[in-house]
Image: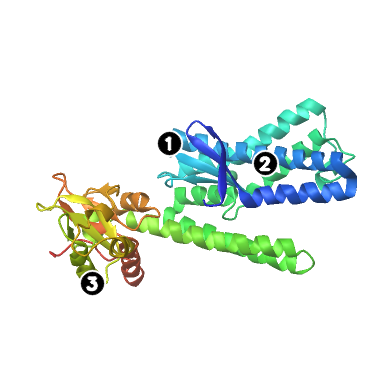
Amino acid sequence: MGWSITIGRFGGTAVRVHLTFLLLLAWIGFSAYQHGGAIAARDSVLFIVAIFVCVVLHEFGHILVARRFGIVSKEVTLLPIGGVADLNKMPDKPYQELLIALAGPAVNFVIAAALLLGVGAIAPSSITHLDDPAIGAIERLAAANLFLGLFNLVPAFPMDGGRVLRAALAMWLGQERATRIAALIGQAFALVLGFVGLFGNPMLVFIAFFVFFAATGEAQMSFVSEATRHIKVADAMETRMATIGHDATIGEAADILLATSQESFPFVDGSGTFLGVMSRSDIVEAIKTGEAGARVAPFAHGEIATVDPAETLDKAMEKLGEASAVGVVGADGVFKGLITPQSLAEVMLIKAARPDWRFSRRGS
Ligand SMILES: [Zn+2]
């Protein structure tokens, strides 16, 4: 995520802080300073930092359990609304998703229990007065962890409880129906929340919007990954396109750019070996800085992910990420085609039109 700085690493996962989070800290410190001076400002900032340390530990609960199932998380980012761990793929089995989702709130409950053992019993009143300085910081932190754990168990996407619900339903109904039902419940929850918020709490309306769109996005993501899991790369890749040869000049590349509407151009040698990809902007960059008769090769990108044509499309999707294309390359290194965001969009179009469509190439 952009606008973030890395503050440390733990077992291969970078912990990053988004700049808006630092702004939040500054704002909290400033407003506490206005009311209670320097000590109040320090205490408020320390308390918020402590809460967000717990949020990071919550995310590491998810990350460490996911790692047991072979799912790696490269970074976790702290935003003012909480932590986001990027898992590079979704778990295959419902029970795995269930355990990964439960691990986060479990961490908060463990922290709360540990803090309570430290201070003895907690007064129930402290849960509703988290900002009351008369209550000890440890108690307030324990109460905040209880709240974090419980709030995340609300059975609505994108909260962990939504995933727990989806995973539990998926054991009976299969991924696709489970996701549809869980997403509907998430959206219904968001509508109720937004409605309640209209009577006096604008913050709730804001959270409701966030929950609603996250539930919708989650459903779409899940449909895409479910739809692509059974399709072979060879049956979905783009095969009819202009390629750029490794000895082509900038002038020839410009001609190819004009002759097609492609976004990405495979870069190949004389025997068809895949060397990388040139994007439109690479070619424009070459035109800007080079002579028409010069070789275009220095402007090509070699470090492009590749997949085997026999792989399934969801694997290609994972590799695609934010990139413009993934090269499809046979065992002999020969270029076969490209998977691009456009290929995925077309697969989803066909799936939407005919859910039972069989993707198998009838010769190209
Ligand atoms: Zn969580």
Looking at the image, is mark 2 or mark 3 earlier in the sequence? Answer: 2
Label 1 sits on what residue type?
Phe
Q: Which residue is mark 1?
A: 69
Q: What whole-number distance in Å separates the C-alpha atoms at marks 1 and 3?
A: 44 Å
> Furthest residue to the front?
291
Residue occupying the point 13% across, 45% down = 332
Residue occupying the point 43% across, 39% down = 71
Query: Where does residue 27 sit, x and y in percent of width and height?
Result: 75, 51
Q: Is residue 11 left or right of residue 79?
A: left
> Furthest residue to the top?
118
Q: Which residue is mark 3?
A: 260
Q: Does label 1 point to a residue whose CB lies under 8 Å from ligand 1?
A: no
Residue 52: which disc? 2
Looking at the image, is mark 1 or mark 3 earlier in the sequence? Answer: 1
- Name the element at disc 3: loop
Circles 1, 3 touching at the beta carbon (< 8 Å):
no
Residue 145: which disc? none
Q: What whole-number distance in Å separates the C-alpha atoms at marks 2 and 3?
A: 51 Å
Q: Does label 3 point to a residue whose CB lies under 8 Å from ligand 1?
A: no
Quadrant of the image occupied by residue 42: top right
Quadrant of the image occupied by residue 39: top right
- Name the element at disc 2: helix
Label 3 sits on what residue type?
Thr
